[in-house]
């Protein structure tokens, strides 16, 4: 990823009102921007990032609460013998019942209301006739549109009794998300998030998928910026209050390489290894971040 500091003649992100070249350019200090109208306009013009106002944030929060409620509902129904299309029906009906629209349905031709990704499926698994079996892991990715606002989150669940490999990859994926969240504060950069995730996952012998990234969200399904889950510390766009985006590391137990199945959606690991993912929608605040899809990231207690 190239360094995306402001241009020499752009307003300095620190909020001083000076040009960047006359203020923080060349200083070896983190830029902690004060959000001004100039900064709002600069981020939109230069990066196509739409900073969210209070009305937007509250709308995304409400969509986020529905997202978490949907994941909680699905979790109660996951067990061996469940058909993946039954999960789709559950998510679709619950979303509509709560006055929302499932964003995945018909998005660029995607045929279902939720993504259900089992075992070696990295993401975009299409629900169908396949049956969950004891020992599987399954990722459920939910995105409702509520009153025009989007929120996006996913979790990976155990089906029955997990293997040691399943326990490892789900734990590493969960902790990778936490590592990314820990870098999410004003003055840090997008590259810091990916760097922290990559460092954590690879130190535990796992790999980070490159082809799919986090993304801005809220007013649309996929907005700027892209949020890679690998990278170089200190590189990328400066994080500032009002940014809303997802962090959603896809972590493989084996190698990172993947391929897409003939359905043109389902991404699977080349080596057949397990893959797990956790995703949150977050808001960058004055002092850190707020999770807009707040679910518990503690390790589950296995029965």
Image (tube, rainbow, N blue to C red):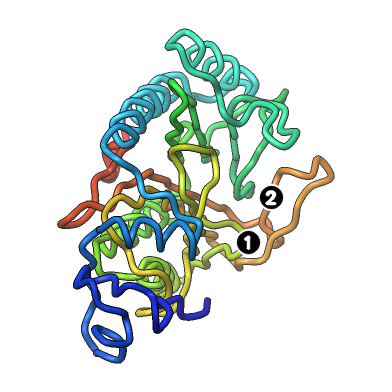
Q: Residue furthest top?
A: 97
Q: Are marks 1 and 2 in contact (CB under 8 Å)?
A: yes
Which secondary structure lies at badge 2?
Answer: strand
Give the x, y percent position of residue 8: 40, 84
301 left or right of 159 in image: left
157 left or right of 300 in image: right
Give the x, y percent position of residue 127: 66, 28
- Disc 1 or 2, which lies upstream in sequence? 1
Q: Which quarter of the rendered picture does the C terminus lie within?
A: top left
In the depicted view, which residue is nearer to us: 130 or 292?
292
| Residue occupying image coordinates x 57% and y 62% | 209
Mark-to-mark CA distance, 1 and 2: 10 Å
Q: Residue furthest right?
A: 262
Give the x, y percent position of residue 215: 49, 52
Residue 79, compared with residue 47, is above or below; it is above
The residue pinned by badge 1 equals 211
Residue 254, by quadrant, is: bottom right
Which secondary structure lies at badge 1?
Answer: loop
| Residue occupying image coordinates x 63% and y 49% | 120
Residue 165, compared with residue 100, is above or below; it is below
Which label is found at residue 267? 2
Which label is found at residue 85? none
């Amino acid at each position: 990823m190239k360094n995306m500091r402001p241009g020499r003649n752009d307003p300095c992100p620190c909020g001083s009102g000076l040009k960047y070249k006359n203020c923080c350019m060349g200083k070896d200090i983190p830029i902690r921007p004060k959000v001004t109208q100039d900064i709002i306009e600069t981020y939109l013009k230069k990066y196509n990032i739409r900073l969210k106002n209070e009305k937007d944030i509250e709308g995304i929060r409400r969509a986020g609460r529905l997202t978490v409620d949907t994941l909680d509902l699905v979790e109660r129904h996951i067990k061996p013998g469940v058909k993946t299309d039954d999960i789709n029906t559950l998510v679709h009906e619950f979303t509509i019942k709560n006055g929302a629209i499932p964003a995945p349905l018909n998005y660029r031709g995607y045929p279902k209301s939720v993504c259900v990704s089992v075992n070696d499926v990295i993401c975009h698994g299409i629900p169908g006739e396949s049956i969950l079996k004891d020992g599987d892991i399954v990722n459920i990715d939910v995105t409702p549109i509520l009153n025009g606002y989007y929120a996006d989150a996913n979790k990976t669940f155990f089906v029955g009794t997990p293997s040691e490999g399943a326990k490892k990859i789900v734990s590493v994926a969960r902790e990778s998300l936490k590592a990314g969240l820990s870098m999410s504060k004003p003055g840090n950069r997008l590259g810091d998030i990916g760097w922290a995730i990559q460092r954590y996952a690879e130190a535990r012998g796992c790999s980070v998928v490159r082809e799919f990234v986090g993304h801005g969200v809220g007013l649309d399904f996929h907005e700027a910026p892209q949020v890679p889950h690998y990278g170089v510390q200190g590189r990328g766009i400066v994080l500032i209050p009002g940014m809303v985006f997802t962090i959603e590391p896809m972590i493989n137990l084996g190698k990172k390489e993947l391929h897409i199945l003939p359905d043109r959606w389902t991404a699977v690991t080349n080596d057949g290894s397990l893959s797990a993912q956790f995703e949150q929608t977050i808001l960058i605040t004055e002092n850190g971040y707020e999770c807009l899809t707040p679910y518990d990231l503690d390790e589950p207690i296995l029965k």
